[in-house]
């Protein structure tokens, strides 16, 4: 996984949007935002994912396939929806099995986007309450495991004043030492 600041230039969201020169983001910076990640080779991944899931209490999982071909006519709408800035009241855990894509997470309080370019073998955990968005890249295909603790709470809460006051958002800010 490669992490770097998103350049905020207009244009196709599926382009890398890397500054020139690139502004890489360190593992320490991601840790300070409570974003966790591991690399687990896809070949023979199951025992390792099972062990991690047990340790972290991720009891359930499913597989999601997202591609331009698979989405058909819904493609344009779907990728726009994924790219709306939002948060969840639960962690968003993804293990990439095939393909590539971009998860963007908001750095707080400076409000910059950090782009996480994921590839097979990447496992990322976005904490509850972090603002983020997702997009396919120009290869237009990703296959990932979604892991979750109990019933998934995947309702996206789009960024707004109301969402800013969501207890899970406030709890997140507290956990990273920002705000009240
Ligand atoms: Fe999400």
Image (spheres, rainbow, N blue to C red):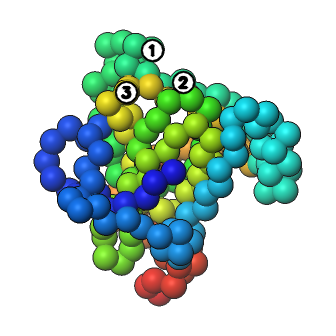
Per the model, the C-alpha gap separating discs 1 and 2 is: 8 Å
Residue located at (33% from left, 21% from top): 75
Q: Are marks 1 and 2 in contact (CB under 8 Å)?
A: yes
Side (left or right) of 143 relative to 140? right
Q: Residues within 10 Å of mark 1 (few under 14, many from 20)?
A: few
Q: Residues within 10 Å of mark 3 (few under 14, many from 20)?
A: few
Quadrant of the image occupied by residue 161: bottom left
Side (left or right) of 33 relative to 110? right
Local secondary structure at mark 1: helix
Residue 102: x and y in percent read 41, 44
Q: Which residue is mark 2?
A: 65
Side (left or right) of 10 relative to 53? left
Q: Are marks 2 and 3 in contact (CB under 8 Å)?
A: no
Query: Which numbered mark, 3 or 1, is in the foreground of this view?
Result: 3
Q: Residues within 10 Å of mark 2 (few under 14, many from 20)?
A: some
Answer yes or no: disc 2 within 8 Å of ligand 1. Answer: no
Instruction: Give the camera-side residue of 165 and 4.
Output: 4
Instruction: Give the camera-side residue of 167 and 39.
Output: 39
Residue located at (80% from left, 51% from top): 52
Tell which circle, 2 or 3, labels the residue nearer the N-terminal end: 2
Residue at the front extreme of this rendering: 21
Answer yes or no: disc 3 within 8 Å of ligand 1. Answer: no
Please give the label number shown on residue 139.
Answer: 3
Residue 137: x and y in percent read 35, 35
Q: Which residue is mark 1?
A: 70
Quadrant of the image occupied by residue 35: bottom right
Local secondary structure at mark 3: loop
Local secondary structure at mark 2: strand
- Give above or below for 43 relative to 69: below
Residue at the left extreme of this rendering: 10
Please give the label number shown on residue 167.
Answer: none
Residue 91: x and y in percent read 61, 54
């Amino acid at each position: 996984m490669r992490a770097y600041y998103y350049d905020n230039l207009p244009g196709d969201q599926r382009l890398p949007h890397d500054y020139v020169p690139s502004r890489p983001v360190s593992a320490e910076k991601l840790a300070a935002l409570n974003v966790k990640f591991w690399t687990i080779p896809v070949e023979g991944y199951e025992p390792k994912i099972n062990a991690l899931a047990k340790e972290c209490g991720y009891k359930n999982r499913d597989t999601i396939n997202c591609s331009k071909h698979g989405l058909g006519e819904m493609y344009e709408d779907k990728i726009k929806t994924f790219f709306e800035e939002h948060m969840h009241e639960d962690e968003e855990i993804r293990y990439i099995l095939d393909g590539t894509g971009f998860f963007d997470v908001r750095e707080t309080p400076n409000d910059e986007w950090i782009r996480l370019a994921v590839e097979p073998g990447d496992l990322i955990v976005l904490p509850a309450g972090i603002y983020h968005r997702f997009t396919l890249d120009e290869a237009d295909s990703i296959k990932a495991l979604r892991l979750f603790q109990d019933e998934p709470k995947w309702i996206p809460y789009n960024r707004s004043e109301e969402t800013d006051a969501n207890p899970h958002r406030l709890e997140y800010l507290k956990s990273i030492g920002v705000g009240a």
